Amino acid sequence: MAEYDDTIAPVPLPRRHATRLRHYWRSQGWACHDNIDLDLLRWGLIVEYPEREIASRFELSAGGRDALTAGLQANRAARAAHARSVAATARHLVDGGRLVFTELSIRTIHEDKWRTCRPDVLSLVPGLRADHLVPQVHEIKVRRSDLLGELRHAKIERYRELAAGIYFVLADDIADVSEIPDAYGVAFHHPNHGYRIARSAPIGDYQLETRHWMALAKARPFAEPPPESPQLAF
């Protein structure tokens, strides 16, 4: 086993270290003088400029700028992958005849606290009876770290009051079905292989209330852009 070298910055950077690096990039770099600063100095990502009358000041080194750029590119790639998976999930549900929302902000109560929730995809069966709507929430995860954080803190449970079933939609290589609790359905999305369900979500009780209906009324349902007319193409 290769010996760990703590003088080399891990890739990707830990979240707190990346946040501190962005802080020094955006500000005049007044030092915090804590363990995060010591790590960044040891990894060669910042350079110290001591001031006699005030606190030390840090600036990013060339390596620090490279690390910040790499983090930015990784985050943009993850957001793009997330957006593709949201769109693929929404198309699958629309093709199944469901009414789909991908830009919904809704208030729920979880553990006696009000939460503003933004489910990646919420869908329901169009109908005239509230007990036939069977709303579902699909939460998209394209990075394993995000999935593990979600499972650890169970934030997805905030959707339980408005969803009869909750799904995790995962990128193909971040987790196995066995790692997801039985309370949730599991689906996978791959850019080339498409969307597939690995385990159906159990159906539970739900009770849509006025605040839910108002949020749905203000939201715009997901719809594919209409095909371009050949007469308007130039």
Image (cartoon, rainbow, N blue to C red):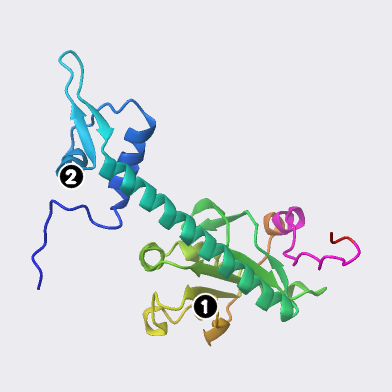
Q: Amino acid at mark 1?
A: His
Identify which residue is drawn at 46% across, 68% down: 142
- What predominant SS class does the magenta segment belong to? loop
Q: Is residue 230 left or right of residue 34?
A: right
Relative to 166, say whether 57 is above or below: above
User: On screen, 5 above or below 58?
Assistant: below
Where residue 23 sits in the image (x, y, percent)? 35, 35
**Residue appearing at x 53%, y 68% in the figure:** 139
Q: Residue 120 occupies which quadrant of the picture? A: bottom right
Image position, residue 171 (x, y; %): 47, 74
In the rendered image, residue 219, in percent from the top left (x then y), is placed at 73, 56
Q: Which residue is mark 1?
A: 190
Could you say where residue 212 lies in the image, as x and y percent from the top left? 68, 58
Residue at 81% over, 68% down:
227
Asked whether 194 or 137 is in front, the reply is: 194
Return the residue nearer the eye: 187 or 209. 187
In the rendered image, the vertical position of residue 137 relative to residue 204, given as above or below: above
Count neighbours of disc 2 (C-alpha within 10 A) and say few if under 14, some if 14 to 19, many if 20 or more. some
Task: Answer with left or right where residue 95 lies relative to residue 229.
Answer: left
Q: Quadrant of residue 99?
A: bottom right
SS at mark 2?
A: helix
First of labels 2, 1 by sequence position: 2
- Helix, strand or loop status at disc 1: strand
Magenta stretch containing residue 226, yes or no? yes
Quadrant of the image containing the C terminus: bottom right
Task: Tell me the residue at 24%/42% (across/down).
Answer: 45
- Magenta-tinted stretch: 213-231
User: Taking 151 as reference, is 39 above or below it?
Assistant: above
> Relative to the observer, which residue lies in front, 35 or 130?
35
Q: Which residue is mark 2?
A: 39
Marks 2/1 in contact by CB < 8 Å: the verdict is: no
